[in-house]
Amino acid sequence: MTVAVGDRIPPFEVAEVSAEKMKTIAALLGDPNPIHWDLDAVAALGMGDRPINQGPLNMGYVINMLAAWAGGRDRVRRFRVRFRGNVLGGDHLIASGVVIDVRTEDGVRLAECEVSLDVVDGAQVLSGTATVQLPEEAS
């Protein structure tokens, strides 16, 4: 795989964030925050009328993009993000990234990437950086 500074990572699309999956993940994580499943609680807090996705799920969409590009989740070496907004049930999302540096450390090729998660026709909800181990280049 040839990678250069400025290369765009193929985006990862989530056509519709599932409110039902939020409820399931909240149960699996033991997350007691009702904003992930209780519309009355969301409304009472003045946060609208749709459930709010968990942060780890939002990070997962970006990690899925990086893993698909680099050849596996184990290739994501470092991942640092900042949450900038909420993802709501029903949102259409795009995870994207761009290579900002390529280097070799201890014989391993690494790409430093800027990453983001955006609501289609809406705001950026997550931004950050990731270091990804690149596959070996073909000889």
Image (cartoon, grey):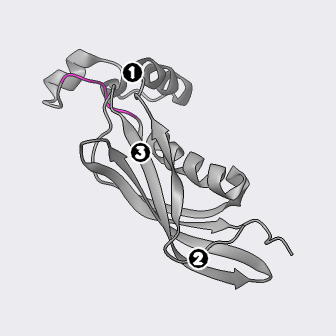
Q: Secondary structure at mark 3?
A: strand
Measured in 3D between alpha carbons, the distance from the residue under mark 1 to the one under mark 3, in whole angstroms, is 17 Å
Q: Which residues are magenta?
A: 49-53
Q: Which residue is mark 1?
A: 19
Q: Is residue 87 left or right of residue 110?
A: left
Residue wearing tag 3: 94
In magenta segment, residue 106: no
Q: Earlier in the sequence, mark 1 or mark 3?
A: 1
Seen at 47% across and 26% down, the residue is 26
Quarter containing the C terminus: bottom right
Tell which circle, 1 or 2, labels the residue nearer the N-terminal end: 2
Q: CA distance from mark 1 to mark 2?
A: 38 Å
Q: Considering only vertical position in the picture, is 44 above or below 108? A: above
User: Residue 54 location, x and y as percent?
Assistant: 41, 36
Q: Position of residue 126 (x, y in %)?
A: 36, 53
For disc 2, the neighbor class at 10 Å (few under 14, some 14 to 19, many from 20) is: some
